[in-house]
Image (tube, grey):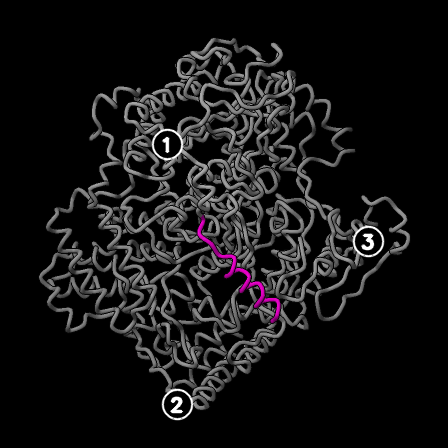
Amino acid sequence: MNMRFLMTWMVVGLCVSASRTPAAEPPAVDVGRKTASMPVDVSTFTQEIDQLVADELKRLNQEQRPEIDDYTFCRRIYVDAIGRIPTIDELDRFITDDQPDKRAQLIDKLLNSNGYNSHWYNYWADLLRVKDVGDKLHHSGNYSEWIKDAVRRNKPYNEMAHELINASGELYKPGNGATGFYAREPMPLDHLANSVKTFMGMSIECAQCHDHPYEDWTQQDFYKLAAFTSKTHLRVDPLPKKEKATYAKDRRILKQKDFDEWIVYRESIRVKHASIYGNGTGYMRLPHDYQYKDGKPHDVMTADVLFGKMPTMNYQMSKEKLESLPKNQFGPGINARRSMANWMTSAENPMFTKATVNRLWRKIMGTELIGQLGGLTLEAMGNHPALTKKLISIMKASKYDTKVFLSAVFNSRTYQSKALVLSDTPPPYVLDGPAVRRLEAEVIVDSFLSLKTETPDKYVATEFRWDGFTHFYDKSRDFTVKDFVDYSIKGPGRGRFQNREEREAMKRNGDMGPKELWRVSTFGRNYKRHWMAMLLGKSNRELIDEANQEPDIPQILFLMNGLGIPDDALIYHKLSSATNHREKMELIWKAILGRLLKDSEEPLFENTPEDLMWALLNSNEFKFVK
Amino acid sequence: MNRKDFIYRAGMAGMSLPFLNATGAAAQTTKAKSVINIFLNGGLSQYDSFNVEVDKPVLGKSTIIKSNVDGVRVSNYYPKLAKQMDQLLVLNAMKTNQGAHPAGIYKMLTSYNPRSTVTHPELGAWVNKCLTTERDSLPNFVSIGSGRAGSAGFFPGQWAALPVKNPDKGIDFVKRSESVGEKAFKNRLNILDSLNKDFAKDFGSKDTRSYVDTYAGSLKFMNSNDIDAFELNTENPNIVNLYDKSDFSRSCLLAGRLVERGVRFVKVNLGGWDYHDGIYEKMPANANKLDSGLSSLLTHLSQKGLLESTLMVVSTEFGRKPEVNPNRGRDHHPDGFTCLMAGAGVKAGQIYGSTSKDGKHADQDVLDVTDFNATIAWRLGIDPEFEENSASGRPFKLANKGKARKELFG
């Protein structure tokens, strides 16, 4: 153990614990504060990871990979921690820094930066599939903002998951965006299968329609789990009673009078009322086409977990009583959904923490710690169970503080090892360092910003941003029926209703900076407008883990013939003040590849800066992290 | 043998090529080589177009005109197609189970209900995957115009449609940037090559090679002799003059050129059909686009001798209600709507299927959208029951439970 690493651990331990504030339960729309966590000793975690890896290498008689130099480290940590390459100045500052613990300091700085909030929003928004869904989640802005808020606060992951699973109430109420997780799903049973995959890394969707072909789950298991969530439903219109008593009369009048007025009336009332109701009855009924011998169609199923400890339930109706009722009856709501959230996100749940560390490891190391992101089993512990166990215990000890977990890995010698090429014949042990990976779509796009400006993270939001729907929800708090009618009559029609509210919301948010300097995350729910990121394989968020890092012809044609760095970009500014050709070359290499020129590259000197920049930006070295 | 092994082996044993077996193929005298699918996003009003044999009030403000086929009449908004009804088969009893746009479009194009645990490939992606050979220098699935581009669903992205947003601009970025001369471009590629070779020494992998290969493929595509298929200005003026200048007509012209070069599946998008209000003020312009573009395309294909080998289909996600609502529009109607087919030996000059006279339901010879897709696949010589597994190993058939309606062909 050398001295430099020991110091690294000590400093990081201090920094991470010092950056926390005392615990407090956050109110609905108070944003920007950090959630507390217990002071933890990150350096011990880091040491433990490295020790386990070293032991395993020794056992397998496999050589340790060499440690990376400062240039490689700098580019890698910027990409993995904040999702873009460093600017020339950021790179220079790090390289010329002569403090022995400068790597640890940089890790800590990046994990607590605006760039982190941008990059990790993309991660969660993909996992949680933030998108507008027709007439279910008409507008996913509040959902998007909820996630951004959780990332900014560094909300413990288990709390975040619990809130998502158990969310209810109005979709567009500022601060209640966790409802988007349920509302974005067209079908309740799909939602359940996706929740299991999201939070426990298991694939049980087959059991929705038939016994799982090669796992143990039966269709009945699935329906018993579904019993926790039964009678949960999304309703976009006001409840029937309220609708009838308050809104129906004018709705009829407007419908006969003018389409545009009627539809704005309908939509604006929906913004106010769209809600998730019901919290689970603990009973479910088998489907009408149930085919197995252990039950009949419409039989009542009592809630049960797939494994582990059954949470306490507060049943108010017996199963026998419910069985005597018609088959469309499921019993009274008893907060069963909360019980399921308790079970699913518990530290004692054997899958929750395991799936989480498997996912985070894959994200920053590029290898499978345990198995496929959505294809884990109860038994699987990966090729190095001791390391898996350790990472699980780190996650638990840090109270699900993602930053502590990341810090522990980033500071390790393991992370700071030479990258491995995952070939057809990999070495016996591949968890001793990251793999060479193509940068994610958003990372490539955001890396262009590092060439354009000295402050690529300047316009990442630091507080809650209003969108058209949360803004309208807020401004219509005291609307009477007459106000809604007046609003609709003056209204400009359905399409422009939303645009008008968006414009007002933008004003309310104040200056958000020029769009060409936004990071991809700032587009939030409007990510699809980011055609460049979509072209590079960004997830369209239909499914979990849908992003890809593969080339195709439209993407390559764009990179070859369509990619332009504007004349006023930072890189050109730097080049214009360079005094000789060599200096220009060095600037280009540092800006795009984050390293110095190699001797073998000197023959490239004869080319123009434009040609070289084109070649570097199209090169694999730019698109991959090594 | 455990269950997992069983599934795996059963899958291997049952693995087959997608093509219909010898008996099936022999039964087909004419086979389609290509498909052009004009997709009318928004929901075509069947009662203001090709299903006019219903009670008079159902037709709203539309009037009936004769066509060039006895017994086949159409609405007054389609005067040009009225003169070519001998080339079209009208399917008047189409049925779907989806009543909202995104779900309806998804169902029509993929044969499946939208789910959030899997995404399904569009028919064009199945065709692309099943029929592409090494000899093809053009992609076999092209989507022209705005709208859903042509998703590969759970297939690898290479089977998705190549999008052409604007028919006159061709494929995005397919030409060298104007500021870069040919020599400079070559030089850039040389530098790129040396950088990539150097990187590969230490870090070359399947993924980096895949990039090198796709760059090579993209360059081949840029320099391909076939790339001019996408350049409308190289078309014979006699053919160009068959069409008017609207984007949709230009898209149809491009589609014709592409099937001439052997592209297997071309989707042409024409949106804007969702007329919930003021249908008789707003619709005629769009109907005119369809009338002109489609009639020109039929002439184009006939003149080139391509109509025998090209299956033309016009489809939409659902139809519109028999009642005109108080806002003088028509709302969504999934039970009994209209699609068209032409070419590839289809029984042209006929009407297949009918709705009840009050226009409320599909009545005779009902054709589900999955059967519609199965029929297209069958006509291309692809088994509609051909199965592929999603990433999580769930098997899906090309046309879901759809069955080919072979009687639509002579």
**Which residue is rendered at x = 62% and y = 75% of the image?**
A379
> Along the line of sight, which residue is nearer the eye, B87 or B267?
B87
Mark 2 falls within which chain?
Answer: A
Q: Nearer the viewer, mark 3 or mark 1?
A: 1
Q: Nearer the viewer, mark 2 or mark 1?
A: 1
**What residue is pinned by disc 2?**
A2
What amino acid is found at the position of numbered circle 2 in the picture? Answer: Asn
How far apart, in angstroms, are the residues tagged by discs 3 and 1?
A: 54 Å
How far apart, in angstroms, are the residues tagged by discs 2 and 1?
A: 73 Å
What's drawn in magenta, residue-wise? Answer: B1-18
Image location of residue B4, percent across then percent down = 58, 67
Magenta region, mostly helix, strand or loop?
Answer: helix
Mark 2 Cα shell of 10 Å, populated few (<14), some (14-19), many (≥20): few
Residue at disc 1, secondary structure: strand
Image location of residue B46, percent across then percent down = 54, 21
Q: Which mark is residue B310?
A: 1
Q: Is residue A13 rendered magenta in the image? A: no
| Residue A535 position (above or below residue B374) | below
Left or right, residue B361 beside residue A561: right
Q: Nearer the viewer, mark 2 or mark 3?
A: 3
Left or right, residue B312 beside residue B299: right
What amino acid is found at the position of numbered circle 3 in the picture? Answer: Val
Residue at disc 3, secondary structure: strand
**Which residue is rendered at x = 44% and y = 15% of the image?**
B78
What amino acid is found at the position of numbered circle 1 in the picture? Answer: Thr
